[in-house]
Amino acid sequence: MVRFAHTADWQLGMTRHYLSPGAQGRYDQARLEAIGAVGRVAQREGCEFIVVCGDVFEHVQVARKTALPALRALGALPLPVYLLPGNHDHLSSAGIFASHWFGPQRPANVHVLDAPGPVEVRPGVELLAAPWNGKQPPADQIDRLAARAEPLGPGAVRIAVGHGGVDTEASKMAEDPIEVAMLEAALTERRIDFVALGDRHSRTQVGTTRRIWYSGSPEPTATREVGPGQLLVVDLEPGGAVEVTAHQIATWVFAEQIFTLRGVDSVDEVIGWLDAFDEPARTVAKPILHGELTLAEHARLMDAIDLRRDLFAAIPSSGRSDLRTRSDDGDFADLDLTGFAAQALDELRGMDSGEARDALGLLLRLAGADTDERAVHGGGHGREGVAAR
Amino acid sequence: MRLHRITLTDYRGVRNRTVEFADSGVTIVAGPNEIGKTSLVEALDLLVEEKSSAVKKEIKAAQPVGRDVGPSVEAELSFGGYRVVYRKRWLRGHLTELRVLSPRQEQLSGESAHERFAALLHEAGIDLFLWRQLRISQDWQRVRGAEQRTDGQPSIAGRAAVSGALQERSAQAVRTGPEEALFERARQEYDLYYTPKRGEPRGEYAQARTALDEANRRVEAAKQTLADAEGAVSEQTRLRRELHEAAAELAETRADLAALEEQNTELAQVRERLRTAEAALALAGQVEAATADLERLAERAFDLDTDIAAKRQDLVAAQTVRDQARQKVTQAQAESERLRAAVRLAGEDVRRHRDRQAADRLAAQLDRAQDAVDRIRAADMLLAANCVTEDVLDGIEAAHKQWDKASALLHANAATVDVQRLGDAELTIENGSVGLSGSTASFAAVEAITVVAPGVVRVTVTPGAGERQRREKERTTRENYRELCAAADVPDLAAAKDAQRRRRESKEERRAAVQERDAAVADVAQDGEELSDLHEQLRALRGRIAAHDSGRPAEPPAPATLEAAQTAETDLRDALEAAEASLRLATTEAAHDEERVVQLNTSIVLLQRAVDDAAADTGHAKNRLKELPAARTESELIALRAEQQQAAARIDQLNPDRLQLRLDNVRPLPAHLEEQQVERRERLATLAERIATLSDSGPEESLDDALAHQARVQRTYEQMHRDATAAKLLYETLDRYRSRAWLRYAEPFRALVEKYAALVFGAGTTIEVSEDLTISKKTSAGSTVAFDQLSAGAREQLALLGRIACAELITPPGAQDVGGVPLILDDALGHTDRGRLDQLAAILDRAGSRVQIILLTHAPERFRIGTAHRQNL
């Protein structure tokens, strides 16, 4: 029996443009710390080794300031770690694995699977690696390697370690995808016992054998991901059963939700969704907004979101949002504008353009401040803080 | 507000003074400079605004110099339905007292009095700011500082009293209420993003734009770095491939070169073989040729010997012929000699006869000439004896003529003496030449003549003086004539003429004789030859003849005549010619024969030389043959020729030209390729370093960072831009409508100022008022001038009109003590001339019916306001 930890897609060095520099720093730190978390869970669970199925680094050429702390964290792990070069950190003469400093800095427990083919972990346990050596999938992709591998003898275990999209994942527009059928045939013929894959950041089981898995990334990297932030611990019995257990690693949350807005309640719903996150400082929450709001409602929503921006790691606006505003009589009824201000208001309302709506929103805010000011003088409740955008 | 009176106590230089103001109309407070007019205004300000406990510099300044007392001010005022007396003292024993006189009496003091007064003012809507703005003071600095405009106009915009007054006259409400506040916020919002004048981005908005530009540049730089890195990697890949390929090419080239060099070596060897074979064949050829030469030389020697023998025989024959010819020539020469001598003698004979003839002829001529010479000599003798030349004759004739003339003159003038002997009387005539012939004599009395009749008479006739002269003349001419004749050796003129004729004949004779002589020898005498020469010639001729005759041989006999001599000579000459022709023929023949001998001798010499040469050649040929190897056998020669052919064929095969061409081409290639390899390796080393450097910096990561930063900055900018655009649109829309409203709003104020301006500056004057209710432009007589470009007088006049208009506006008719404030003018209109001053006085007078006007002046006479209440300080 062999027990090992399966992880992938650490993407160290990755930048999220919607994160402020500070948030990006925290996010980087969290993903670096995830290495330690992976090691702790693996050790706790009694794993013999860890395989990282590609994209350990975000780039082929990673700055040393990114790579060296990662190597240090890897070196601190109490068990062997096998790194597979993926499409992001493929083998290149100019890449990190070929750099003059990587060799000297590589901890002894860290092994780079830099050649296609089998690597013995210990007698009876073998990895079958398909590293990437360019931006295109390798000629010796894991499905082909598996198909060519010698059938296993009794008592031996062979774990296929690959990276890339599979042909059964319709959403994946990968070039030259890994053929799941070939892998399954190889599994059936016992040329391999398990396929550990990287590339999808969501934890995903592929096919029907229960032996082909994407571990997903240990920390989320996008709000669309499903089930990221986990480590898979795999038990393999030579010629016997397989057991895959997921362990939570992530400390960050990347979430998105679609809202169809109409009326004050729908605004409250969005605000409620945001306020429901436990750790907003480690949360990227992306509301996807549809529908239509009055200027006042829209202003309220925007104020609410703005207010929370400093709280959250990021509240990115979504390209999928399609929220419209309309100026409603009610928006301005309370303002009791007369004279030239009323004339200007009429003109702006008649313009029907984004700029005009923005101008109306501003007018509402400025007039509202006036109202509030008067309200403050009258002992009412003010909104100055919200108005400061 | 209305000011009824003011009392200053211990205030500056004033111990105690009360000034009362008229309830309505204009109050003129007159007093010289420095008497405290301005103190009145200042004291009012202190009373209304400063607490009595205040210890400010300006309060201290109000304390009288050198007196330790507290300055005190008391004023009686009415406003908003209240009439109050308000009093304050500062510094020493400071106090505040407020007495409300009506409508309900009140008495307050201290802090509560101050507060109450402020509350009352507020309640009445009195705007103290506006109050100060409506003043005109000489010294703006002293009028409470910086709130004053520098152009002298009041700052009245936005004051509630003004706005309220305008609103009452305007359909639209502006400058107050929520609209104005909204506009102000919109403007502030706009100001956050744009500069007020040029509307250019500013502050955070401009910074966002700059940051975005910077971020874009950073992205471009990062992209460039990444592209550099990728370029370096792709170059590295290419170079590595090239290095590998070039190594193979180098090996191939080296193999090619080795094969070519091998061929080249073989070529050299084959060439050597060819050369050896060809040398051997050449030697064999030489032996063969030398043998053939010897044979040929022997043949030639034989031929030559034969030739020489033949030639020698010919020579002997030719020499015989030649000798015979020589003999013939000798004989011919002798004959010619003989004939030549005969011809010579014959010639001499001919000459001897010719000489004879010449001598005879010359002798005859000489005889004739000698006769002529004798005649000449005779003539010469005659001539020598006769000296009467023509000239001499001419002289004698002339002298004779003179004498004849003198004689005639003498005789013509002389008295004629006729002597007639009468009877036989003797009569003699003494002296003279005169004789008595007969019985008569007649003579001229040219000399003293004495006629004597002896014994009878003696008559002497003596000529007179004239006579003597004529007689002298006659004598001198006669003597001259006689001298000349004597000189010519003739007795008289006739003889002279005869002598002269003879002389002429002698000369003629001589001339004829000379002619004769010359003619006699004319054909023989050469130029200059004298007769003596001819004689000599004759002697010579005769000598030669004699010599010939004596010397001539006897034989042949001398010819008798010239003709015979000439015939003999001609015959001999013909014979000589024939003999000489024969000689010439013989000589020619002899020369020909001689030539033949010479030719034969030469031929023999040449042939002998050829024989010698042939002998030498034979010797050489023999020597050469001795030096050459032995002659090859035929089989040996065949083998050599086969070797030669083989080698040549191989050389052809190897194609030396092409081989050399390829060698030249290929030899430098390996070094060249090596050099390229070295360059590649060096470049690769450089690239490796560069890639390492670039990789360490993580160019993709840097680009990601830059892109993330760009995205953030872009979002910030876009949001900012959206906000800015909204602010701009809102502000500009509000501003547009507000400006339109403004025109209507400010109209009552503007119209009032314009009405007064027309009174001061003339009908048709128009005024423009700007947003802050200040006068911006004045147009009169078609000329529009901005306020600050106006003259000082016009500016102060318009500023006053603005104040009057404002004061009128804020004071409801018949309610001066409600919302309005007094208009206080302190020494105003210093720049204004008399005419305008009167116009302004009229306006003030009229305005005074609604507004309380207090005029402080040191020259009250300047303000001609009939209804004014006057106070002197």
Image (spheres, coloured by chain):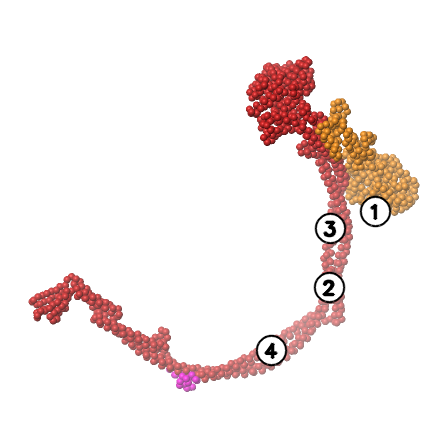
Chain colours: A orange, B red
At a point 64% along the width and 17% down the height, the residue shown is: B77
Count the marks.
4
Is B272 in the magenta? no
Secondary structure at badge 4 equals helix
- Residue B335: give its label: none
Q: Quadrant of residue B869?
A: top right
Evaluate whether residue B739 shows in this view.
yes
The residue that disc 1 covers is A139
Left or right of residue A146: residue B844: left
Q: Are marks 4 and 1 on the same chain?
A: no
Left or right of residue B192: residue B16: left
In the rendered view of the protein, which quadrant contains the C terminus of chain B? top right
Secondary structure at badge 2 equals helix
Q: Are marks 4 and 2 on the same chain?
A: yes
Looking at numbered disc 2 in the image, what kind of residue is underneath it? Glu
- The answer to whether the residues at label 3 and label 2 have Cβ atoms under 8 Å apart is no
Is B555 in the magenta? yes
Q: Are marks 3 and 4 on the same chain?
A: yes
Chain containing the residue with disc 1: A
Q: CA distance from mark 4 to mark 2?
A: 54 Å
The residue that disc 3 covers is B676
Looking at numbered disc 3 in the image, what kind of residue is underneath it? Gln
Q: Dot 3, how many residues are within 10 Å of its Cα: few (below 14), some (14-19), or many (20+)?
A: some
